[in-house]
Amino acid sequence: MRSRYPATSNFSYSFGPGPVTPAIKAIIIANVAAFVVSQFVDVLNLRLGFVPDQVLRQAQLWQPVTYMFLHGGIFHILFNMLALWMFGVELERMWGSRFFTKFYFVCGVGAAAVQTLVSFLPVPALQQVYYAQTIGASGAIYGVLMAYAMYFPNRPIYMYFFFPVPAKYFVMIMGGISLMSSLQGTGGGIAHTTHLGGLLAGYLYLKGGRTHLLAELKYRYLKWRINRMRRRFDVHPGGRADGVNRRVH
């Protein structure tokens, strides 16, 4: 006899990557707390925001860390924390909270370092960065986005919430926009050099930091020397294809 009631579905539905992981939860709480305090203490952003000139000339060495916890408005912090949750949760589950936290801060501080370095380039739009103040977690989050694209290159990301783009191409597009905007000095107050710095810091750390960058450079140099000697003496390696491009870090 047939039941009058529909069968229970075996499918469940969820939005996003799932529950917030411990490290990301702590980072979000710290950012929200700093944002709330900054609404009542105006001087907080002035003292803790990142300004390359103040770090180098006045030795305010805390700024490359503290600027990551400050935001200029409700939508600034909302979108940054949303992106951290969307792209960071799966990475933290895979890496563990300790390594994810380390990676997050490496990207944030690395973004500040790159911003300082590019401010010395003979490009007017970049030289202005030396005296400009930067606040926000975008540099660290762009590093997280880079890591997401490196581990899940073909995962679709909905650009502007409508157009699915593989993660690897999404990062290329975002990096290209930041590069062009930083060179042209456009962006309405957005620190595009920090975005680029976060992408670069994340890439270098994952490709070099986990296997030691100097060791990686030495490996590449030795491979180049060996291949050069092979070509010189017309020696064919044979066997399987060269494994340089197949190495996974």
Image (spheres, rainbow, N blue to C red):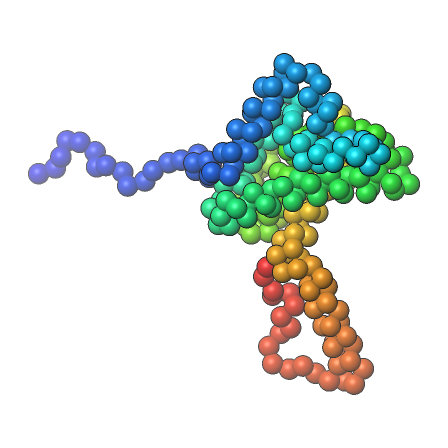
Q: Quadrant of residue 221?
A: bottom right
Nearest the viewer among 198 and 178 is 198
Residue at image coords 65%, 27%: 70
Asked if one can make out residue 244 in the rendered structure from this viewpoint, the answer is yes
Is residue 47 rendered to the left or right of residue 16? right
Q: Position of residue 196 (x, y in %)?
A: 72, 41
- Is 81 or 239 nearer to us in this picture? 81
Q: Residue at x 89, y 38 (%)?
A: 123
Tell me the quarter of the image containing the C terminus. bottom right
In the figure, 220 relative to 161: above or below?
A: below
- Horizontally, residue 100 falls left or right of residue 71, namely left
Q: Look at 73% across and 24% down and name the residue there.
A: 47
Point out residue 153 in the picture as x, y percentages from the top left corner.
57, 51
Q: Nearer the viewer, residue 42 or 2?
A: 42
The quadrant in which the N terminus is found is top left
Q: How many marks?
A: 0
Q: Position of residue 105 (x, y in %)?
A: 63, 41
Furthest-left residue in this view:
1
Determine whether 236 is above or below 179 in the image: below
Q: Is residue 174 visible?
A: no
Q: Is residue 35 left or right of residue 182?
A: left
- The quadrant holding residue 32 is top right
